[in-house]
Structures are given as C-alpha cells and as structure tokens.
Amino acid sequence: ATDVWSKKDCTTELIGCIAEAYQTYQSTQGASGVAPAFDKDDDMAMRFVTAAANLRQYVFKIDPIQSLYSAKGIAGNIIPAIATTNAIVAGLQILQAFHILRVQLEAKEKGAKEAEEGRYKSCCRTQYCLRNPTRKGYLLQPSALADPNPKCFVCRSATVDLTLDTKSWTMEQLLRIVVKGQLGFAEPTILINGDLVYEEGDGAEEDYVCNLPKTLDGLPAGGIHGGTVVRVEDFTQDLEVDLAFVQKDDWNADEAWKDKDAEQRYIVGGDKPVAAAPGATPAPAADKGGEEKKEDDSKPAAAAAEEDSDDDIIIEEEDPTSAPPLNNGAISNKRTAEEAMAGGEEVGAGVAKKAKTDVVAVGAE
C-alpha cells in the first residue's frame, strides 16, 4: 500500500476499478437503483481515485506521486465543497477579472501601455447578492464602483515620506510613534530591502525583538538611512505601506523645532489615518512632523452658517416695518405665526427680531 504505482500500474488499476464498479452497479441496481457513494474506506473507490489522480500528475508533471496509503490520508481530510455563496462570489470575481483583462487587451491593440484613466471603473461593477429577488426576478444587483478614498493607504499610492534622524531614532520609537500611532498598524511586519527585521502577531519569531532598542541606521540588512524605502505590512488588516526615509540631522536650525522633544522631531508626508494604540495616548496628528494640527477657528461666521444651511432656513430682518406675513405652515413657532395671521396684521418689530434667530422647518406639519 505504500508503493508508488507506475504509469502502467495506474492504467491497469483504473481499468480494473471501472470494470469492478460496473459489475457492482449492475448487481445493486435492482435493489436500490443508485450507485454507491464514495467512501475512503472502500478499497475499490480508493484504488480508482489513486490511479486517476496519479495519471493526471504524470500528464501534467505534478509532484509528488502519491501511494495508495498517502492518497487515503489525503482523501480523509477533504471537506466536500458545495455551491454556497462563497462559490458564487468567487465566480463573480472571475467575471470582473475578465473585464479587466478585456480593457488591457483593448489598450494593447491601440498601442498604449496602460488603459485610459477611468476605463477600469467604467467597465467593472460591484455585484451584490440579494436574499430576495428584485421585481424583475434578479438575484444579483450591480452598481458602479466607488471612487478611491484619497486618505486610504489601500486605495491610493501606498508610499509615505518620513523625515527624521535615523541615527538617534530606534526601532521601538518608529513602531510606537509612527507605524502604530500615526499609520494605525496593529501587528506590523518590517522589511528592509526584502529582508525581515521585525514582525508581530501569531507565529512571529521572537529573535527579532532584539532589534527594538537598535537605532535605525544600525539595523540588519544595511539599516535605515536617507533614501531607504522600508516595507511595512499588516496581514491582520490586509495593509501594506512603503516608508521612504529622509535623513535630517540638524533640527535646531529651525525655530519651530528647538523646543520639541526628540520623539516629536519627525515629519510624515501626505494625508494619513490617525489610529491610537490601545491604552496609550497617540502622537498628535501632524501636518509637519510633531506639530499638532489645530482646527481653524478663524472661519467666518457667514461661512459657518452657510455650511449649516443645507436643511435649515434662517429668517433675517430687513425692515421691521415691512416684514411679510408669517406662513403658518413654515414657522416652527406656530403660536406666534397663528396670532399674526389671525389678526391680519404684519408682524411687528418684536416678532421680527425674534424670528431673526429662529430656525424654521420647511413644509406643513
């Protein structure tokens, strides 16, 4: 049972199993009318599977060729696959891949290296699997692709410029302040020139912990210097970012950096998501390094009112003596409006002054 069959042995076994299966089917057809199901403990079934699989491996040069004993162990660990939603979604993904290949072929026929901008978005669709059919009986609902989020490292070009002093910063500071505090990585993996220098998560090697107290320029794989591009990966979030380092030695030359701590002397280029490490206060969101980006409180009141005026209407007084009659269905202060309409009078200065600051809802209640 542990011997590996040759091509001749596999062919002989396959033909013999087919003849044996036919005889078994003929003998049981009168009783049940159904062929027996596959069972890994059935000797004939396992010989058939082993012979057929090995012949396929011989044809396509797939190694290693399995013995009957090995094939039985593999068959015992296979979970039968059924046509579930996962299989449907996988098929829809392949269909979208066909659209992408078609766009690339069209671009190649036109002599262009890349497809026209926006061409992929126009040909691909987001497909939703519905539990209940639509009015037309469809169970799949396509929709246009959403635009990439410019602040998402997955949607946009995942390269971030990072300016700091690689001679004084350590790997521990880089991970805590920038990678986790600024970029929001949970279990980062650090690679320098393709060589692994640090990793976290299940199954991570503890040997790389010794690199945490080392300065960036003293790390293995040549270290990190100005011009070095470091790959940061997080498989728990399916996230990858390239950090392009820029070396800066003299931070005291700029007045803005003289009073900053060493851990605040860095500059992260581009927009980025800010994620706080659990149980710790993250480094402040920086527009230029460690400088905290403050909200602009100098926005004119008129501009603020305009932003908030999408759903509300502000009534302002132009002339107290010529204020128009108030609409009963439009004023939130219904009592004041009803008194004005019932008296048939124009609203006086006092009511107009109050209406100047009242927010009213459009439409009858």
Image (cartoon, helix red, strand yellow):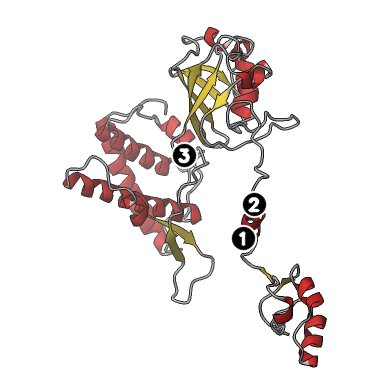
Indicate which disc, 3 or 1, sits on the residue closer to the N terminus.
Answer: 3
Instruction: Look at mark 3 in the image and give the residue it sits on.
Output: 75
Mark 3 vs mark 2, CA separation in Å: 72 Å
- Mark 3 or mark 1, which is nearer to you? 1
Q: Which mark is residue 306?
A: 1
When asked about the image quadrant of residue 89, the answer is: bottom left
User: Marks 3 and 1, how far apart in space?
Assistant: 68 Å
Q: Are marks 3 and 2 in contact (CB under 8 Å)?
A: no
- Quadrant for the C terminus, please: bottom right
Task: List the residue tagged with mark 2.
Answer: 300
In percent of the image, x 62 and y 36: which residue is there?
274
Q: Observer-nearest residue: 158 or 93? A: 158
Q: Is residue 48 left or right of residue 112?
A: right
Relative placement, left or right, of 252 versus 160 is right
Residue 172: percent from left, percent from top = 64, 17
Q: Three-letter amino acid code at disc 1?
A: Glu
Residue drawn where x is 82% and y is 82% of the image: 335
Residue 79 in view of the camera: yes
Which circle, 2 or 1, is nearer the viewer? Answer: 2
Residue 201 seen: no
Give the amino acid at mark 3.
Ala
Q: Is residue 192 above or below residue 180?
A: above
Residue 111 in the image: above or below residue 339: above
Q: Position of residue 254 (x, y in %)?
A: 58, 18
